[in-house]
Amino acid sequence: MAYKRQIDRLPIPPANAKVHNVTCHYCIVGCGYKAYTWPRNQQGTLKNNAFGMDLGEQQGADGTWMAPSMYNMVKQNGKDVHLAVVPDHGCVVNAGLASIRGARMAENRPSRVTGTQQQRLSDPQVWRNGVWQPSTWNDALDLVARVTARIVNDYGEDELVVSMFDHGGSAGGYENTWATGKLYFDSMKVKNCRIHNRPAYNSEVHSSRDMGVGELNYSYSDYAVTDTIFMVGANSLETQTNLFLNHMVPGLQNGAKFIMVDPRRTVTVNAAEEVAGKDNVLHLAIKPGTDMALFNAILTHVVDQGWTDDEFVAASTFQGGEAVAGGSSQPAGLGSLDYAMQTCRTSLEEAAEICGVSAGDIRTAAQWVAKPHDDGARRKCVTAYEKGIIWGNDNYRTIGALVNISLATGNIGREGGGCCRLGGHQEGYYRPSDAHVGRPAEYVDQLLINGGGKVYHIWACDHYKTTLNASQFKRVLKKRSDMVKEAMDAAAGGSREELVDAIVGAVNAGGIFVVDVDIIHTQIGQNAHVILPACESNEMNLTSMNGERRMRLSERYMDPFGNSKPDCLIAAGMAQHMETALRNLGNDAYAEQFKGYDWQSEEDAFMDGYNAGNPEVTYDRLRAMGNDGVQEPVVGFEDGHLVGTPRLYADGSFDRHGRDDKRALFCAAEWRGYAAPGKAREAANHDFFVNNVRANIFWQNQFLDQDSDFVQDRFPYPFIEMNAEDMAELAISAGDLIEITNENGATQGMAYPTDTAKRGQVAMVFGSPAGSQGNVVNPGVSELILPEYKLTFGNVRKLADAPPQAQAVTFKSKEYKA
Amino acid sequence: MSKKCNRLVDVGRRQFLRGGAVAAAAAATATTAPARAAPANAQLDYPSNKLANIADLAVNEPLDIEYPDGDSPGILLKLGEAVEGGVGPDGDIVAYSVLCPHKGWFLNYNADDRTLNCPGHFSRFDAEVGGQQIWGHATQNLPQFTLRVDDNGDIFAEGCSDLIFGRPSNVL
């Protein structure tokens, strides 16, 4: 039986409610919302309220409505206040649409009154006497700093390993990336660090940048005026929901064609067919990991048909053959179009053989991407890609091959064009140089597995759910951290110095001291020794930019839960304690490097970092720009408004590679089959391709949704979409618990019969607390240490009959049926 | 814009029911906005509205209804197999709001797989599993009306499981 809220009435925001600008912190799109707060003992009326509407009238479709999930009661300046977070009809990004994630922002706030999100951390926790004990910031940071200072002072900064977010939105943003960046890249030069979703500190799109093309170069408005949307390895209706509904759908209604490259049929394909008609949608369901051959064939056909934009190619791209030679840190050569074609040339028939789709369909795709209109006008095409190729086979060459097509057809920097990743989180990166990290960057997971590192700081990452080769990673980290726990237990009752000595002794014996900064007690947090409670966006002011570089200030409307703090202020506290600890060790010169963190607020961190590099941009000015914000880069301030940049490279010069000639480069993308270690063998030896997929309901907020009755009711276990005939052969019924296994480990999920699933292919949702897909992802990475979560193969078996929770859910098709 | 699925609208019955619903709504309004407020009840007082008689229902042929008032459309549906929350002698009669709890578009009933589908943004709900959202953007499952069947086979709606789209209170 479906979960029922049993809520049939809500408080009404009064006309004098405080109004705050909110950018949804969950996904890259960054939809605009308005947060209303008002005193607990007040309310509006049907006629007189904050919405300025007669709420006694039934609202029509698309009208303003506060769903129960948009309401909560939270602390603001120490007092309980009502909170309503409703989508902003005036915001250009979402025009009043709310996703299933953003519409639950209010409900996903911690509240002592309504009891929501009581899993949130309220106080620092220190491993003490065999359990985690709540403690004070001073106590916890003192222990963190003393141990960390001893290690970096005595053994060097390479013994400090750091996992840290690099993005915007929640658990990120310019304030927090700056503070952590200043601590680890300025006060120290930590090179053994990684990002939340990949095992190294690196770009996910090296090739695009090396070619001169920053990966977020368009404006969302380009979708409405384009001729073709060319989407690769993405599922935007689920994962960039309101970008699809508010920008791509209008494009399709305006007559755009839609091409999807994805081994799996998704709700995005279905919705595109509903809007545009099946004749205008081409789904290229290629064999997993063969994207590059497809792109090369499209490029070859475009070149051979003379559909290239010769003027653009001549004026804006490199002309002299090879510009950058391939080498150890350079997976492919870069240069002119002619140079790249020597490697990329692939016939339609060759690609059809490799990709498992027809040559005719590939030809159609090339026509929709590039064939000029009958009147000779060039064709506009937006190319949009995401994890299907970022986390797929041979990242560098595959993305390079895709960017080649956009460059050859002059579809970057122009209205109705763009070649962009769609993104996951918002962006919000502002840090000192990371040049010392090197390229390729250290494969940090392997370093840890092989016994490297003595202290491990983790910022808002839960690799137990979201890394590759997770089974081994978990096993080793637990073992190493348990050594330190045992040493700490044995030192119980001793002085702080004796405790630090015991910890240092344990890490020198192969253990590792783990500090976890997060908003909840995570799975990796189980193996931490100090846990520091952070707060989220809107519990602090936070700036980020979305997938079209739209920067907003999402305002604080409530207090951090308990004694939790913004990450930037936690980093500042850590730095200040490090200074003290290093002085106590007698290293004044080192201690001096930890000065400059006397911030009282997140705004101080913003001014110290982002504003120092972008002096036009201040909190007051961003606040005045509201939920539409300003598209970066900001180029001025005129008439009280920040002046932004709707589209990059509009002047035809490309600079992301840092080359003085400002000409874009083409990538010599050589098809090499499954390139990463172990992948080809794994594919040959297992029955199923194990796709790694997302679901709109908990995409980007599953860690909170493990505490949501509404979400847990729908998906009590991670779903594994599976073909009915495969299920029958393995005696698996809907909802049964099934196990996916291979040499790397095993994971579990709930069988979800799916009529569009191909035989021999399953699709498992990523990042679930109740079954980590990463357990079965092999450690093979690309040359520049990009993981290939998407390219996984395994066997499937039944574990158990459907548990009661799974028996209660619907297993009908996710596709809309008129 | 959306268009309600009117496959099975019985205009005569619809007009009859609307009369009853409007009277109930008027009564509810009178109790919620007096000049001097009486203490509010902890839960809403829902009208008891007759929707139909069991004899009016055929399996998998939804009947248009309005509850708790004329501005809140829904369907009454006999599924043919007992479901949790179903009423009637066969335990198979259910009723739902058909305003999508995402953005208030009218949902279409698909008799083939017994789902309610939103043409606005592609959300869909399972009529056989308590209105559970199969896939979509709504942050709640479909509001389900509480039903009672009397000895004559008359079916009454007397409550609702979730807030109906477009209103701050199910009874206005």
Image (cartoon, coloured by chain):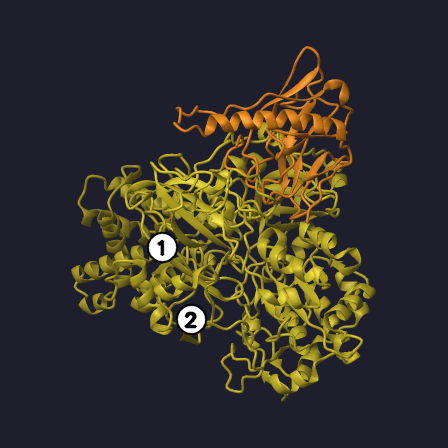
- Give the structural element (helix, strand or loop) at label 2: strand
Question: Where A180 sits versus A746, above or below?
Answer: below
What residue is disc 1 on? Answer: A457
Spot occupied by residue A560 in the image (x, y as percentages of width and height): 33, 47
Question: Where A409 sits versus A603, above or below?
Answer: below
The amino acid pointed to by label 1 is His
Q: Quadrant of the image for the N terminus of chain A?
A: top right
Q: Quadrant of the image for the C terminus of chain A?
A: top right
The answer to whether dots 1 and 2 both sit on one chain is: yes
Image position of A150 (left or right of A634): left
Image position of A501 (left or right of A265): left
Crowd band around label 2 with a 10 angstrom C-alpha radius: few (<14), some (14–19), many (20+) = many
Spot occupied by residue A329 in the image (x, y as percentages of width and height): 52, 74
**Colour orange, chain:** B
Q: Colour of chain A?
A: yellow
Eye-nearest disc, 1 or 2: 2
* Residue A240 seen anywhere in this rendered image of the structure: no
- Give the structural element (helix, strand or loop) at label 1: strand
Snapshot quadrant of residue B151:
top right
Earlier-in-chain disc, 1 versus 2: 1
Residue at coordinates 68% horizontally, 51% vertically from top-left?
Answer: A266
Question: Where A171 sits versus A724, above or below?
Answer: below
Spot occupied by residue A365 in the image (x, y as percentages of width and height): 76, 66
Determine the CA span between mark 1 and mark 2.
37 Å
Q: Exactly how many numbered labels are in the figure? A: 2
Residue at coordinates 33% horizontally, 53% vertically from top-left?
Answer: A566
Q: Numbered disc 1: what chain?
A: A
Q: Determine the residue located farthest toward the top in the rendered image.
A: B151
Image position of A441 (left or right of B129): left
Q: Nearer the viewer, residue B108 or A290?
A: B108
